[in-house]
Image (tube, rainbow, N blue to C red):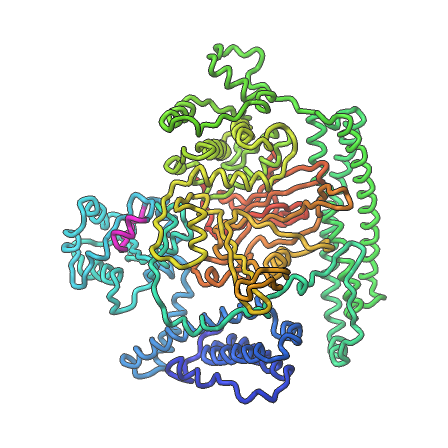
Amino acid sequence: MAHLKKLYLGTSLDDLDKYTAIPEHRNLGMKTLLNTANKLLEVANERMRDGDEELVYITYVKYFNMLSIIRKRPDYSKNKSEVHKILGDNTDNRNAMDKLEIIYKSLSIRYKELETSKSRISSSNLSTSAQSISNDVINSLSAPEAYTKLGIISCEELYKRMQQKSVLVMDCRSSADYDASHLNYYCSFNVPEELITPGMSAGRLQARLSSKDKASWASRSVKESVVLMDWSTTEVQDGSSTPIAVLLDILQNWDPDVNYRAPLQILEGGYENFLIRYPTYCTNPSVSAPKINNNDNDAIDDIEYPSINDITMKEDIVIFDSKENQRPSINRANKPTTLRTQQNHLKQPQSTQVIEEIRDQHATLLQRAEENDRLLEDASKKWRRLHSAGASQSSEGQESLYNLLQLESESKDNRLENYRIRDRIMKLKEDEVLQDDNETTRQIEIKIAERQRLDEKHERDRLERERLLAIARETKPHYKPAVEPTIAPNDKSPPLSPIDEMQHRILNDQSIINSRPVYDRATKPRNESRAAVTETEASRIRDFSPVIGHNVGFGLTGLKNLGNTCYMNSILQCLSNTSHLQDFCVSNEYKKHISRQNKTNGQVIEEVAALIKELWNGQYKCVASRDLRYIVGQYQKTFRGVDQQDSHEFLTILMDWLHSDLQTIKVRRRANSELAWEKSWLEFTKSQESMILHLFYGQIKSTVKCVTCSKESATYECFSNLSMELPPNANLCQLNQCMDLYFSGEKIYGWNCPKCNTKRDAIKKLDISKLPPILVVHLKRFYADPSNSGGYVKKQNYVQFPLDNLEMKPYLARVESMSSTPKTFRLYAVSNHYGTMEGGHYTAFCKSAKYDRWFKFDDQVVSPLESSNVVSSAAYILFYTWLPPLKGTC
C-alpha cells in the first residue's frame, strides 16, 4: 500500500458504515449484480494502492453485502459457475476478507489516535508531517537499528543474543504463567506482574523479589542489553498502566543508581510470539496465552463463510493435461475482434521480446541436457559392462544402477521442459504473437525436434535396461550384500569380553539381526525394567563404522547403505537437517524427556539422537546406522533384512515412535473447554505431549454437511504428514493443485443425517484445524493398478513446488485461520525416489541451516546442490517449515 491518506470521510467506523448500504436490487439481473460486485473489488484494489483506507473499507464491505445478496437469490445454484468465473473461488473471497480485516484493525487504531491527537495538536497537517518524517527516519535504518530506535527487539534478534549470552530478560507475566512455561535461558527471570504497581522505585521493586531473582535483577547494569516481555505486547503506549509499561517506566525513570549499557527494549509479540518461533527454547511449548475477549473483531467474524454452495468440489477443479504428446484444446474462434486488434498493435515488439526469452530458455535447457547426456552415456556403458560380467546385482552394480536412475530422472525432466517450450511456441502462434516465418522461431523448433529424437533414444535404452534387470532379478532373487567386518583379521586389539563379543556379532551378523526375537519388556517389573535400560545404555558401545574425512563440514556426513537402506538414509538426513530437532538432540535436551513406560522404552530417540550427533561432529565422511537399524527392526519386522522399503512408511512409524519416546510433557486441561478440536487433541495426547508433537503434528477437521438440511457434523484426526493424491492424466502439475484436490469437497451418498433421521446425500470437506510448525507433505506416487493384477505402479508426475512462500491459509479451518500462527512456509528438505516399484533408489536434498545452502545426500556421498535443481520429478516427501533456522549446535 502507498502512504496512507489522511482520514477525511469520518471519525469512526460507524460513520463509514453509513456508506455501505446496497440500493434497491430486487429487479436487477444476476449478470448486473455480478458485474457490480466485480467493479467493487476493482475499486477496492485501486484505492488500496492509493492508500485510501476509508474507501477500501467501504467498498470491501459493500462487496460482501452484495455477495450475500447474490448467494440468497433463488437462481444462485444455477449460476454458481458464472459466479466463480467472475468473482473467483473461496480462496479469492477469503483473501479479500483478510484484507478487510487488516483495514478494519488499522482504521480502528487510526481513529483512536485521531481522537487522542485532537487534544494535543491543533493542526492535522502537522501530525501528518511529523508522521512522514518519523517514517523517513525509520526507513533509512536497517531492521535491527529501526527496532532499537522504536524500543522493540525481534524474536530472531533475541535468540541471537541468547546464543551469545549477552542479554538479560525480564519476564513480567504472572508467577503462575512463568512457572507453567518460560525461556530456557540462564539469564531470564520473573518480575511477577502482581508485584508491579505504579509509583514504585526500582529499589522498592527489588525488595519484593525472591533471593534468587534479586541476583538476576542486580546484573541489569552489567549485561549488554536488557529486554522486557509479557505475553504479547509489541509496543507500550504513553500513559499505559499495563505491568510491562509500569516496569519500563520504573527502569527508565526511577532507577537512578544504574546506567544501562543500551536502551531498554520490549520483545515484539511477547512470549507468545517467541514460543511459536523457538519452541525448543521454552520449558513447556504447549502452553497458550490467556484468552482476551476482543469485541472489535465481531464485525468481521459475523461474515459467514462458506455456505454449502460455495464449497469447491473436486469435479470443479480443472487441471490441464500436460502429456508429452497432447495439449489442451483451446477454442479461440470466439476471441473478440477488439482484442485481436489490440494485440496486433503490440505484436511486433512483444514477439521480439518473447522469442528472445524462449531462445535463452531453450539454450539453457540444451546445455543442461547435453551434459546429462554425456554422464548418462558413461553410466549406461558402465552398467552394461557390469551386467555382461554377471555383476549387475553386486554392490558395485547397485551403485551404478542408482547413479543411472538419477541421471534418467533428470533426462525425463529435461524432456518435459523441452515439450513445455514446444507447446508455448505453438500457443503463441495460435495467439498470433509469433509468426510462422520467423527465422529464430524456426531454428528453435528444429533444435526442439532434434532433442525429441535424442529423448526417444534414451527412453528405448531405459526400457531395454529394465528388461535385462528384470531377468537378473529373477535369476538372483535372494541376493544379500556382504556385511563389512568391523575388526580387521590382523587386528592386534585385546580379545573381546563375552558380552562385547555377543554385541559385536549382533551388530555385524545379518542372520542374527533377522532372527533375533523381540522381548516383551512390559512383562518385567517396573524397577527391573528401568535398571535394565540404564545398565544397557551405560555399557553400550555403538558401531558407527566411521570413515574419517577432512574438512567435512558440520551436518555433511553421509550414511552407508547397509543393503537397500537408502530409504532410511534419506529420511534420517531430512530429520538431521531439521534444525530444531538437531539442536534438541545434540544439546542433550532430549535426555530430560525420555519415557521408559512405552513400547520402545526410549530406545528409538536414543539411537536417533546418537546418530545425529555423529552426523554433526564434522569429523566423518560417512557413518553406519547399524544400531538404529537393529532397534527399528526389533520393533517393526518390515524394516528387518535387506529388502527395499517405502520411506514414507518408515517416516510415519518413526515419528510415532519418537513422539512416544518423548511423551513426558504434562499439559493441564483447561477447565470446561467446549472447543471440539481441543477436546480431540487432548484425547490424542492424553494430556502428555512431546517435542516431536510440538514440531511435526497437526490436526485435520473433517466436515460432513447434509445437502438437504445443511446439518453439519465434524470429526478431528491428528497427523504427522499429509498424503496428497497426484492429479490423474497430468504429466505436469503444481503442488497447490494437489492441495486444492485434497482439500476440496466430495459428494458422499447414504450419510445418516442426525437431523433428517434418514440417509441423505452429503458433502465431505477437509480443513487443517491445527497447523504444525513443520509441515511434511507426501506425494502419493504409488498406487494399485487393476490392469496390473493389483500390483503397485509409480506415478511419474512432475510436481512443481515452491522453495519459499508456500501459502497454507486457503486450506485452514476458521479456528486456525484466526490464530497468530504463521501461515507461510519455506522448503528445507526433500526425500526423492528414483526408478520404479521393481527397482528404485532414495536420496535427500537438504538445505543446511549451518551453511544456508542446499546439499545432496546420496547414501555415503554428500555434495553441493544448486537450488535450481531441487525441484524434480523424483520428489516424494517435502519438508516445509515456518520456524526460523537454527545454525546448529555442533
Q: Is residue 550 visible?
A: no
Quadrant containing the C terminus is top left
Q: Nearer the viewer, residue 349 or 589?
A: 589
Instruction: Give the x, y percent position of residue 277.
Output: 42, 52
Number of labels in the image equals: 0
Q: Nearer the viewer, residue 86 or 708?
A: 708
Q: Per the image, is 703 magenta?
A: no
Q: Relative to 580, does residue 151 appear above or below in the rendering? A: below
**Residue displayed at 59% across by 40% down:** 649
Q: Is residue 796 visible?
A: yes
**Residue displayed at 71% across by 36% down:** 839
Q: Where is residue 636, by image quadrant?
A: top right
Residue positioned most to the front: 757
**Residue displayed at 50% across by 19% down:** 503
Q: Relative to 67, does residue 702 appear above or below in the rendering? A: above
Query: What range is drawn magenta here?
Result: 166-180
Left or right side of 31 for 251: left
Left or right side of 285 for 378: right
Instruction: Give the x, y percent position of residue 14.
Output: 40, 82
Instruction: Give the x, y percent position of residue 743.
Output: 59, 59
